[in-house]
Amino acid sequence: MDSSDKAALALFRLHPSATDVQTANVLLKSITDEKQFGDMLVRLGIAPLVYHNKAHYNLTAGLLGTVTAAYHRTLLRSMRLSAAFQEIANVCAAQGIEIIPLKGIYLSEALYGNIGLRLMSDMDILVREHEAMACINAIRQLGYSQADQYDSDLGTEIVHYEPLVKNGLSVEIHIKLHRIIEKYSLSPTLLWQHAKPA
């Protein structure tokens, strides 16, 4: 692990301690290629967190510009995804289809407390298997479409269906959390048992 990797790792904190900040600032001094380091922070999804904690770190003007731009791009995309998710949640609720948001669409607000801090490429939602097609049809009513259709007679294991896409935004309908060949078992039933209406 080189000094850039160590610096990136040190900056990967939502709420850095005083020790974390001190370590990060020491490592930031060792960065020789600011552009390459900034690009790495963006690529790894760390840049928005660095922006969030910018008051703690000794950032050069160039690096501050890079993380600021990355934060605003992330925030803009997250705002679009959050609005789309709300529309999907509303149409599903209107049809009596319960959904659970997974990964970024849930974590960005519940864990990070700021939708601009976590990169989201798409929306992932969990539905009960017997309601999957009703959910897909409800989302299609909003103008989303799928590139491919799944044939339920193929006998292939489905964890999530082909993404539905509209205006560059994508949503995946999950009926499972992982494939059965994995060495662990995470049952969707547990999520449903502990889910809280919102």
Image: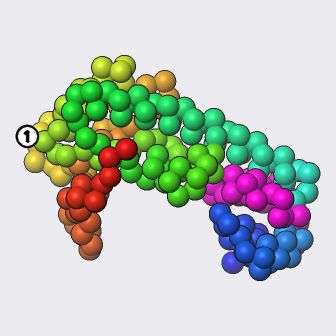
Nearest the camera: 176 or 98? Answer: 98
Eyeballing the image, is 7 above or below 143?
below
- 45 inside magenta stretch: yes
The residue labelled by disc 1 is: 153
Residue depicted at 37% across the width and 44% down the height: 198
Does any portion of residue 147 appear in the rendered image? no
Please provide the residue range marked out in magenta.
30-58
Residue depicted at 76% across the width and 53% down the height: 51
Asked whether, in this view, residue 5 is left or right of residue 101, the answer is right
Residue depicted at 71% across the width and 40% down the height: 72
Residue depicted at 17% across the width and 45% down the height: 129
Mark 1: which secondary structure?
helix
Q: Quadrant of the N terminus?
A: bottom right
Give the residue type that dot 1 points to. Answer: Asp
Eyeballing the image, is 9 above or below 39?
below
Q: Position of residue 158 (x, y in %)?
A: 21, 49
Asked whether, in this view, residue 5 is left or right of residue 65, the answer is left
